[in-house]
């Protein structure tokens, strides 16, 4: 049933590179846009250049970062490091508000549970994975066979190399690449500005441009209590970027849907996004209520609220693309044209034509159980970090008793070290906030699924808040020693636990697993099998390579530093400190345009013309936050922290007319570190001065 | 840590046979008491004789039966066939009350879900099982290693032979034998007398002697809709047994505890039996209440009530042994003497001495969680056949996803065909009776474990009866098509079920599995590892073989037809029809001494001196019911159906002074079939007349 591409195809991708739309492309490091760069920019992309950039790039949580000194110094966004900064804050030491600067290495603060990774190698394992499918398997069985092969590949690689090994599914299952990472778990905070300047303009200006944000922070990686030697790091660009400069972003875009079929886009537009947006909107409102309880409550809620507002704005932007009839009509027309071409060739038609219909049927099948999937397996019914912990402990204990290939994918042997570390990390949890969030989610759960036995049992006739309060007050999972006990005790300890949160996780696990399996069998596996066919058909007929959709793994994008025209007005490619001070003054230095005391005090010292932010046409999406943006010489020119509002529909259709990535400018960073924060040792380290 | 015996030991057992107490012994067919029979009875036990008897013996449910004609006719007890007889009864056709005789083969009634097995072969696999234990394993790990090896042996054997393969653990883990069975699933009822005569004297006379019961029934095994050719069957003895005759019983004794340590006996006496007896007593009272609702209710409850009364009387008898200070003192003295001997030899002491202490510690550890184990894993909290079905479906789905060696033992691949057949059998279930039983068990569950989350959730503030009623009324498991759907659908179907009984099974499964695992790890595996050491020590020091405790597998016992003295009165070795009629008349033909109309009508025709029941010193225990009792020529002399009250303490200590097995006499059977039931064709078949 499945047309096999394998190695032969991987070579094809390396040769026939003709990007379809302007500077579009989140390119694989092992299938880079060599030809396009040569043709369009006369740039010779060498293996050394690529290897250097790969090893200087850092996977930071779900996002990105880079080495900017030979001593393990890692640059990322403030909003990427925010979780760590919050975990290091207390009621009396609010690093979000005050910022932080470790003047000496001894002052650097170890971030609990934070784990950074550096990609070492990529290997094409498509043949090995697809060989596991014996001919004639149904999609769900094929998925199982592939998963077993993947687990075996990962296990073998991690045993052989001692590295973290993950197989990545590309082109919706047409290709499988093995990524191996060096993992670092001693990561210390070096510098963070105040959130007021990092997130200047707040949610209001998020996903907009012009911007004036110092959205950076710096960490340092240690091993054996010593900073690591980061031989591959990005040197600072001695000159500011100019309009028209070729630049690159190297980072970890999370997901795009450019190769999705029309039916998949319809599903997002009509089912997934409406629910997700409504859910975020309700939660945003509630968290704002919570924040009004007082400054400490506001501090506690800040991280979650930021995340929700950010996601809400992003998804609203994506949805605006899907609601754009012209965009959707074009998608449909392109798809129909492709299918027409396929039907014109009986051999191709026999293999590929039904792929779109199969996917459409799967989306239709998914709609009626989408919410059950979200509420149970997605955890939307149990919004508290304790539930996440409980579920991880419950599943870890169960999955560890199985052979690697039979486990839920996130509990494969290769993932266990990270999971156990996470389970033992000491991070602050605020019970009142947990109760607040859990109460809301339980109310939604009851509204949607109140007749289910599990929900009736959980409520036992009580109010959601009473249930939530009892669960949070009763659980002992806040104690890392208790979590360790479950980790060590295994299945029996979990099964005989009387912890209410563990009991809850056990109670809902059958339904969660069942609905996950149903999703995997009836939706995901169909999408994978047929998505691979769609990608193959595209390649066969277009005679050219398009990069795969984003998968949270390292990608290279390129573009030019370039302003754009909006509502007939020319938007310049960069902003300067002057604009920051002006904007704040214009709003009477009030939230969200309030400047921190450091910036107010340094106003006279700061060279006002210094560029602060800039934009380029580099393709990016959520997960690219923290990506270094570099020039032809691979020198650091800035750190990507956002896209403008026009970039959001590019989740599905890229266009470089207005779509821009937004960066903090390298020169702006130095100016702030020097003049505002008086962080000369840090500046010297970054600029390579002794 | 574990001293290995293996094959060498198996040979030893064949050679050094000197039974310890009179005719004691439930002997293995592959380690029979050749020497004892030769010495004591001048009987030459040949391989042919043994092979013939083995192949003529039938495993019937948890009990016994035998082929008595070349056409697949199987003799057993009425109380062994009772489940099948009840399943074939309806409100309007009460076969328990009326009896049944199929005058032609076409009239024979197929018993739903009934499965008979005939032992084909026994193989010593001790070495293979014990080799799986690498040295230095803790008991729980050793148990896991052994279980994996056992699963592999069973799988291999069943694949190789196509037979049902089961590894049996003997001497508490000192030996492992592989038993392979031919399984028959088309079993039809041929003849059953009225329960009034089968169980004459009722619960009152159960486990007593003299007796006057026609506790027999006959089934026939079919394959491809034809009676099978049972080449190995027992010919009918042409002459009645005489006092002093050597006889044998071949059957499936369920369990004995003669090799248990003193600490294990104390546990039974102080923890297990008191709870079990109280539980049965309460249930008996309640079922009698239920029976008083009317004749149909009484009919429905009859089977369960019989089982409970039988078990209650048996366990009360066992307990009377444990409460007998002289018996227990002797046990302790013997054990201490054995340990003294061991301590006298430093080499033995190092290996064996601590075994008793380890077991004692395990019993002590078990006591606090015995009830939780019984209520959850033992199912005492959920007494309804629907729960049993739901749990089997839930676990079957989960266990089938695991490799054979990792499964709960009763879900190994070799057991699946039987399980699935059982799940698809159509057997009558009476919802009011189910609700009645479930209500009681839920009341007990709440009393014992009312603070557990699972119990609170299940009750949700309601009365036990309401919960039970909702569960039984709501479940669709009565429909075989629904059960088939779960069997076919697997894990996902189970996990997403909205059947309340499935939900209940899912709810309690984590605790059930947890407490089972705790029991296996902290108690059972310690008992096995150390029980094997105790058995080895016994063999080493006694220089003689004792047969292993009963394990529900085929055993041969021998003894003589012999009366006994009770309270100074001589009890004769047989009873006759005359006594039956006299006893009934003495009680005014009232329950439980009421004779059925057939017997009343045939009184004049019956030769009153014909023997009806008889006794012998053959060792037996529950599970031996239905065993053929045969003479030196392996001819059928009667069918074992009971032991007298003095036989019950023999669960722990055998003595042949008064301990007797009770049989229905072969001549009595023929007399009844001929004169009472006019079943001449059946008699002709049995006697081999055309």
Image (cartoon, coloured by chain):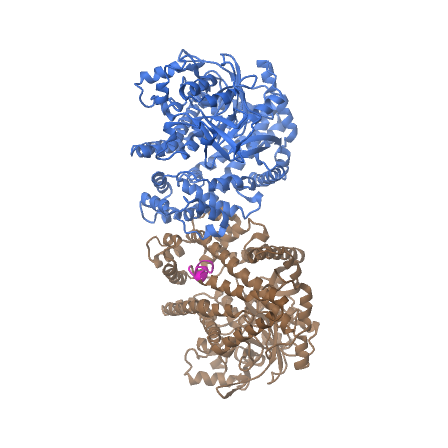
Chain colours: A brown, B blue
Image x and y of residue A394, in percent: 49, 52
In depth, the one of B225 and B469 nearer the eye is B225
In depth, the one of A644 and B624 nearer the eye is B624
Above or below, B433 relative to B576: below
Horizontal placement of B143 versus B368: left or right?
A: right
Horizontal placement of A30 versus A264: left or right?
A: right
Above or below, A402 relative to A307: above
Q: Quadrant of residue A338?
A: bottom right
Does the magenta stretch mainly form a helix, a strand or a loop? helix
Residue A17 in magenta stretch:
no
Above or below, B621 relative to B563: below
Image x and y of residue A70, in percent: 65, 70
Q: Does residue B592 show up?
A: yes
Residue A380 in magenta stretch:
yes
Image label count: 0
In depth, the one of A346 and A173 nearer the eye is A346
Image x and y of residue A409, in percent: 56, 57
Image point (52%, 53%), residue name: A396
Image point (61%, 71%), residue name: A344
Above or below, B109 relative to A22: above
Q: Quadrant of residue A291?
A: bottom left
Q: Does residue A69 show up?
A: no
Image x and y of residue B399, in percent: 52, 46
Q: Report the span colored magenta.
A: A368-381
Q: Quadrant of the N terminus of chain A?
A: bottom right
In depth, the one of B558 and B293 nearer the eye is B293
Q: Quadrant of the C terminus of chain A?
A: bottom right
Horizontal placement of A553 versus B265: left or right?
A: right
């Amino acid at each position: 049933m499945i047309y096999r591409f394998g190695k032969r195809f991987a070579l094809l991708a390396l040769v026939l590179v003709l990007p379809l739309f302007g500077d579009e492309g989140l390119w694989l490091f092992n299938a880079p846009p060599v030809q396009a760069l040569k043709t369009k920019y006369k740039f010779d992309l060498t293996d050394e250049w690529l290897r250097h950039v790969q090893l200087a790039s850092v996977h930071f949580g779900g996002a990105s970062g880079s080495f900017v000194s030979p001593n393990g110094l890692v640059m990322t966004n403030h909003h990427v490091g925010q979780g760590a900064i919050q975990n290091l804050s207390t009621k009396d030491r609010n690093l979000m508000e005050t910022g932080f600067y470790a003047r000496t290495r001894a002052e650097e603060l170890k971030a609990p549970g934070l784990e950074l990774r550096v990609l070492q190698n990529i290997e094409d394992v498509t043949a090995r994975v697809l060989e596991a499918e014996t001919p004639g398997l149904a999609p769900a069985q094929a998925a199982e066979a592939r998963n077993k092969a993947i687990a075996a590949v990962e296990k073998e690689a991690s045993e052989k190399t001692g590295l973290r090994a993950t197989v990545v599914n590309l082109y919706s299952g047409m290709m499988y690449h093995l990524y191996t990472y060096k993992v670092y778990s001693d990561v210390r905070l070096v510098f963070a500005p105040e959130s007021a300047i990092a997130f200047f303009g707040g949610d209001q200006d998020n996903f907009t441009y012009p911007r004036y944000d110092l959205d950076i922070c710096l960490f340092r990686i240690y091993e054996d209590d010593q900073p690591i030697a980061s031989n591959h790091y990005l040197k600072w660009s001695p000159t500011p970027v100019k309009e028209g400069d070729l630049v690159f972003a190297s980072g970890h875009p999370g997901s795009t849907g450019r190769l999705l079929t029309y039916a998949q886009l319809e599903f997002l537009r009509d089912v997934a996004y409406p629910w997700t947006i409504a859910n975020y909107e309700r939660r945003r409102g509630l968290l704002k209520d919570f924040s009004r309880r007082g400054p400490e409550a506001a501090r506690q809620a800040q991280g979650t609220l930021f995340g929700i507002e950010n996601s809400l704005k992003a998804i609203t932007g994506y949805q605006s693309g899907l609601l754009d009839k012209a965009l959707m009509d074009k998608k449909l027309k392109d798809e129909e044209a492709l299918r027409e071409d396929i039907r014109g060739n009986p051999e191709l038609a026999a293999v590929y034509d039904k792929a779109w219909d199969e996917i459409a049927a799967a989306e239709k099948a998914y709609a009626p159980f989408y919410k059950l999937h979200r509420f149970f397996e997605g955890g939307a019914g149990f919004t508290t970090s304790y539930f996440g912990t409980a579920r991880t402990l419950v599943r870890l204990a169960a999955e560890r008793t199985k052979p690697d290939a039979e486990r839920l994918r996130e509990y494969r042997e290769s993932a266990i070290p990270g999971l156990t570390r996470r389970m033992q990390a000491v991070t602050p949890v605020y019970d009142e906030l947990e109760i607040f969030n859990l109460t809301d989610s339980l109310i939604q759960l009851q509204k949607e699924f109140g007749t289910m036995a599990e929900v009736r049992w959980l409520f036992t006739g009580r109010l959601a808040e009473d249930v939530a309060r009892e669960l949070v007050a009763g659980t002992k999972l806040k104690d890392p020693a208790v979590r360790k006990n479950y980790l060590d005790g295994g299945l029996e300890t979990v099964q005989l636990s009387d912890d209410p949160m563990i009991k809850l996780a056990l109670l809902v696990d059958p339904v969660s697993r069942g609905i996950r399996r149903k999703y995997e069998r009836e939706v995901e596996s169909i999408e994978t099998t047929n998505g691979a066919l769609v990608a193959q058909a595209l390649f066969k007929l277009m005679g050219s390579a398009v990069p795969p959709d984003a998968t949270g793994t390292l990608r290279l994008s390129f573009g030019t530093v370039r302003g754009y025209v909006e509502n007939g007005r020319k938007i310049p490619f960069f902003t300067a400190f002057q604009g920051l001070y002006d904007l704040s003054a214009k709003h009477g230095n009030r939230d969200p345009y309030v400047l921190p005391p450091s910036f107010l005090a340094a106003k006279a010292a700061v060279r006002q013309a210094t560029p602060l932010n800039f934009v380029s046409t580099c393709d990016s999406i959520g997960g690219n936050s923290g990506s270094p943006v570099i020039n032809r010489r691979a020198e650091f020119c800035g750190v990507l922290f956002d896209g403008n509002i026009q970039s959001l529909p590019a989740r599905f259709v890229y266009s470089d007319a207005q779509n821009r990535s937004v960066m903090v400018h390298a020169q702006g960073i130095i100016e702030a570190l020097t003049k505002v924060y008086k962080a000369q040792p840090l500046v010297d380290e970054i600029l390579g001065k002794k």
